[in-house]
Image (cartoon, rainbow, N blue to C red):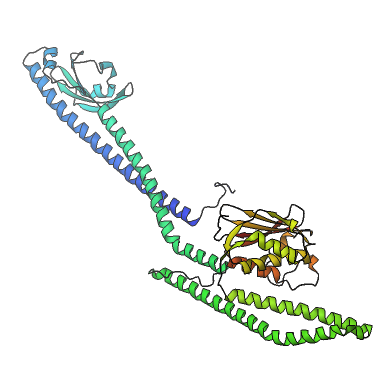
Amino acid sequence: MVSLFKRRPGLTDRVTAGFALISLVVALAISGATYTFARIYLVQERETIALNRTLIDARVVDAALEDGKDPAAALADVPTTTDSQALLNVDGEWFSNNVTVSPSDLPQELLAEAATEGAWQRFSVQGSTFLGVAIPTTGGFFVETFSFADLEQTLTILSWVLTIASILALILGGLVGRYSGHRLLRPLRELGEGARSITAGDLATRVEVGQDPDLQAISEAFNEMAEAVEDRIERERRFSGNVSHELRSPLTGIQGLAELLEERRDRMPEKEAALVSGLVSQVRRFTAMVLDLLEISRIGGDEIVQNETTDVSLIVGDLLSNRGLSRSMLQGEHVRIATDPRRLERIVANLIENAERHGGGVVAITVERGPETVRLMVDDAGPGVSQELAAQIFEPFTRGESGGKDGAGLGLAIVREQVRLLGGEVSIERSPQGGARFVVTLLRGIDAN
């Protein structure tokens, strides 16, 4: 089995990958823009709130200091929250309402500008981000720090949500691409199925012409081609049938005269007697070929199959006996199926004749019953069939290298056409005995014994 990793991706796979990639790129672009704008907006909003609050708290502390309160009492007037910390520097001494951020953690750049005009700056303490805002006050400066932990947590959650959304967009894009690929290729698959049906012999196959103007021309062209092929093959079949039919009457007369001459051969000189023998042999061969051609033409034009409950082993055994062959060649159990006994008899007879004429004789005929099929295997004693010949052995007028000049090469072609009408298939394999094995697999109406 071909590995999935070595299989060349088809058009549906490429459409799926294209939709998925486009969806992923669009999702990443939207997610990146959303995250960037959200981060900028939330940070700016956080900074604005922090600046306004620090200005208010600094005025409260400065008013307390002007009223003569000590720095600790002045700092106590500032409302405490979980995400901020107030610090006050008066005459070089620090006062604080909690110990989240120590004065030594404050940036020196922020402290350098705090006593003059005020400043604000983001900084990190043990991996956590803080915003420090410094405002000058009476005798020193006021500093308030704000934690960005909640904001960073919000941004982290947002990033995960956008990442998951991008993955979902990738999957959804792939599913949409797969669906679109199947919809786009459905008319092509119908054309492929129609072509295979025609190849299998169903010349009446036509594809549906849809409403899509871009695909109508293709479907109509396919139907026109199929109709032209059917007409041409039908004309050729009629021609072959007519020729074979017209040849039967003169051939019958010629064969009668040849057989009459054969009866009087013992009265003729030796040279003329040999010529008569050759003539009779060639006339009989010609007659058999014409009859085979007539049968092939009828097979192509007559699709009627008259199914009956038929014992396959019984038909094979009778054919072996009628040809003077031992019934012991028949192996397997009795199998009864619903099929056309006349066509089945013709199939087996041709395979036996082919083995006797070209394969050194029949070695064994095996009948196997499967759960849904019946396999009929004819083994011969010949040298086998080469791979090159096996590919064309069921074509008309094809003969093996050991076949000599006897036969017209139509027997196996008749087998193939008859098997096709019975809804089965025929193939050639290597026999366990070393020769060729012809396998007929019947796929229709198997009855229980």
Locate residue 159: give its quadrant: top left
Q: Where does the image place residue 177, in percent across and percent down from the top left?
A: 41, 53
Image-based side of 124 in relation to 341, left or right? left
Residue in front for this viewpoint, 115 or 343? 343
The answer to whether one can see residue 392 in this image is no
Residue in front for this viewpoint, 64 or 155? 155
Image-based side of 435 in relation to 206, left or right? right
Q: Where does the image place residue 317, in percent across and percent down from the top left?
A: 70, 61
Locate residue 43: give its quadrant: top left
Image-based side of 122 in relation to 171, left or right? left
* Image height of 443 relative to 30, above or below: below
Q: Where does the image place residue 351, in percent across and percent down from the top left?
A: 71, 64
- Say how many tags the image has: 0
Q: Residue at x 91, y 83 (%)?
A: 266
| Residue that extends furthest to the left in the rendered view of this protein | 67
Image-based side of 375 in relation to 211, left or right? right
Q: Residue at x 32, y 40 (%)?
A: 162
Residue in front for this viewpoint, 378 or 66? 378
* Image height of 164 relative to 361, above or below: above
Q: Where does the image place residue 256, in percent across and percent down from the top left?
A: 78, 85
The answer to whether one can see residue 366 in this image is yes
Q: Residue at x 53, y 66 (%)?
A: 197
Picture quarter with the C terminus = bottom right
Locate residue 48: give its quadrant: top left
